Amino acid sequence: MRKEHLFEGMRGRIDDRVILAMAKVPRELFIPESYKSNAYEDTPLPIGYGQTISAPHMVAIMCVLLDLQNAMQILEIGGGSGYHAAVMANLVKPDGHVFSIERIPELVAQARENLRNAGVVNVSMIEGDGSTGLLEHAPFDRISVAATAPRVPEPLKQQLKVGGKMVIPVGTTFQELILLKRKNGFYIEEKMGVAFVPLIGEHGFKE
Ligand code: SAH
């Protein structure tokens, strides 16, 4: 599929700012050689180590739900290829920053290279268990979780600013994409059924 077709199909359903940000990030740079020709199909693709880069429409929907604006501090759990982080980085630039945590060291190295090749400067790709968050850079305006959790990890709730928002898939066979808002308390909206790889860690699933 050609790039224009993918984004044309999103028009009217996805916020224009998000489509524009996605159009600026070359998805082919985040995809292994053997799948590059599929870069602009609206489907998840393997990135090695049993993991996948999310489908473009899923990245788009999660970005829309988070309402990303300039200067925001973002935490992403499940950096994978770095693509989703690059799109969010585009939406919060020039003053915002994305901290992305990935547990598989080889993917961290690959994602850093991908981000460098794409010229993205406001993402820090960090190796570790993101289910515990990233205390040294907390609190965050937005948290985006790209792996499904048994329940919303408590540390992530605590590291969200008051007025902040988090998107996170929750569940096993049946997963629900949840939008969690922190105001005077925590408010949850169930958005849609989804299929993500498991969040593996202290506040996720056990290995
Ligand atoms: N956002 C990614 C898609 C990532 S798929 C992209 O744009 O390519 C989900 C990723 O979550 C996988 O790479 C997996 O290794 C990672 N993951 C799973 N559990 C994790 C944890 N506890 N901490 C950090 N990363 C985790």
Image (tube, rainbow, N blue to C red):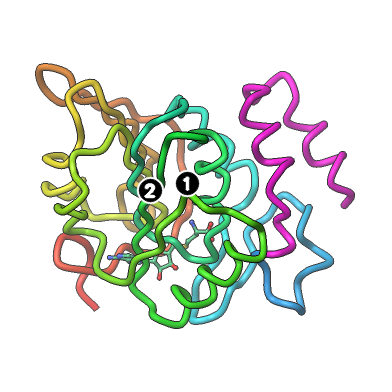
Mark 2, other Cα within 10 Å: few <14 / some 14–19 / many ≥20: some
Point 34% across, 38% down: residue: 73
Picture coordinates of residue 157, whole percent (x, y): 16, 40
On screen, residue 113 versus residue 103, left or right, reads right
Q: Which mark is residue 53?
A: none
| Residue 13 within the segment the image draws in magenta | yes
Q: Residue at x 14, y 52 (%)?
A: 135
Question: Residue drawn at (84%, 66%), measured in percent from left and top?
Answer: 37
Q: Please identify the quadrant where the C terminus is shown.
A: bottom left
Neighbor class of circle 1 (other Cα within 10 Å; few <14, some 14-19, many 20+) is some
CA distance for labels 1 and 2 = 5 Å
Residue 64, how many percent across, how many down?
Answer: 52, 28
Q: Which residue is mark 2?
A: 175
Could you tell me if the residues under marks 1 and 2 are in contact, i.e. CB atoms within 8 Å?
A: yes
> Which mark sits nearer the N-terminus, 1 or 2?
2
Residue corresponding to mark 1:
194
Q: Which residue type does callout 1 highlight?
A: Val
Give the structural element (helix, strand or loop) at label 2: strand
Q: Toward which corner of the image does residue 24 lie, by quadrant?
A: top right
Say if 43 sits above or below 22 in the image.
Answer: below
Residue 193 or residue 2, whichever sits in front:
2
Please say whether residue 152 is one of the residues in the magenta stretch: no
Q: Is residue 28 left or right of residue 63?
A: right
At x 20%, y 55%, the residue is 134
Q: Main secondary structure of the magenta part?
A: helix
